[in-house]
Image (cartoon, rainbow, N blue to C red):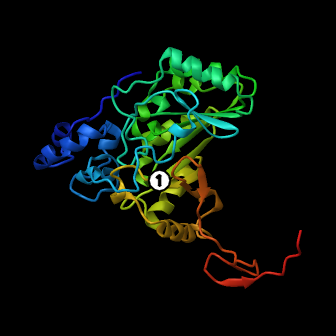
Amino acid sequence: MTAISSLRTPSELVAAQLVRRDRVAALEQVAARYAVAITPAIAGLIDPSDPHDAIGRQFVPDMRELESRPEETSDPIGDEAHSPVEGVVHRYPDRVLLKLVNACAVYCRFCFRRETVGPGRGGLSRAALAAALDYIRSTPQIWEVILTGGDPLVLSPRRLKAVTAQLAAIDHVKVIRVHTRVPVAAPERVSPDLVRALRSDKAAFVVLHANHPRELTKDARVAIARFVDAGIPMLSQSVLLRGVNDDAETLGALLRALVECRVKPYYLHHADLAPGTAHLRTSIATGQSLMRALHGRYSGLCQPTYVLDIPGGYGKSPIGPNYLSADCSAIEDFSGQRHAYPPQAAD
């Protein structure tokens, strides 16, 4: 793993003028519990004069993170309940997560794995990776492997290429997907060697995590283009966050910017019940209202699926608004007007 020059302590955040000096003692309590890392690319986007800055809210620690609610849990989406071997999560029949590393380029303040990621957490040992690959080889229903973590793109191209080659050699694995923040958080890491590391005779997809249009800087767009120009399609996933993207104008601008970068919006996640994240979560009703505001007013290319990862490990379900009446006799258009629909014959 190649080190990334990042701000990692409240004192470093003060030196970078991202937080006030009188907040250091308080924020050290947060940093002692949850990892902090802000890359130069992200630090350059934060407006220190704005206490409500949308980028700062995602990455600068906040004392409210120490306030946990009863419904919040250290494993909000139930990874542990579906982990047959270390590093593998097998929640759905045809796909698995392969958690190669427990470190990220940046640490999001709303992360659902915040209790398990951070500096020094390491990744899979050689023996653990071998066991994880053996599990995938011995489970023929696995059609897709999703590389996650942490962020797999903090690994060196050499290590990524080795894992990709081993997965590509498994006949029943047809798709390799990579989930990452790196193109926006540390775009300089997206080198030609890293892009080549993901190429094989299997279908490869990169899923970019971005939550605000300002994250798609010139450098980020160059990094994204390297994947797409190399024939690796890109999707996106975003998390609905209070004070970051919970208005139609901001969310719409993000989705349009992604499409302009040739990235297809895939999921809009309702924020998970991770400890200390209540100040960043919206209501589901807010998310449904936003999806209604996007529908019909923004291109279909810009429409993600709004999903909730059901606590306890039961998987994601779409929770977008419904436009059809209960008896299927009427349907609403994007303006909210109802229209009759003919009676349906029984199947």
Quadrant of residue 296 within the rendered picture: bottom right
Residue at 37% across, 39% down: 115
Give the image location of residue 65, x and y in percent: 29, 50
Quadrant of the rendering where the N terminus is positioned: top left
What residue is at 43 percent from the left and 39 percent from the top? 219
Camera-nearest residue between 328 and 57: 328
Residue 186 in the image, given as x and y percentages of width and height? 40, 35
* Relative horizontal placement of residue 59, taking residue 255 as reference (left or right): left
Q: Position of residue 310 (x, y in %)?
A: 54, 53
Q: Secondary structure at mark 1?
A: strand
- Residue 344: which quarter of the image? bottom right
Q: Residue, x 35% and y 33% (percent of image)?
A: 118
Q: Which residue is mark 1?
A: 239
Residue 304 visible, this angle: no
- 243 left or right of 210? left
- Residue 220 in view in this figure: yes
Q: Position of residue 305 (x, y in %)?
A: 60, 57
142 sits to left or right of 271: right
- Residue occupying image coordinates x 66% and y 77%: 333
**Amino acid on which disc 1 is placed:** Val
Tell which residue pokes out farthest to the top in this image.
127
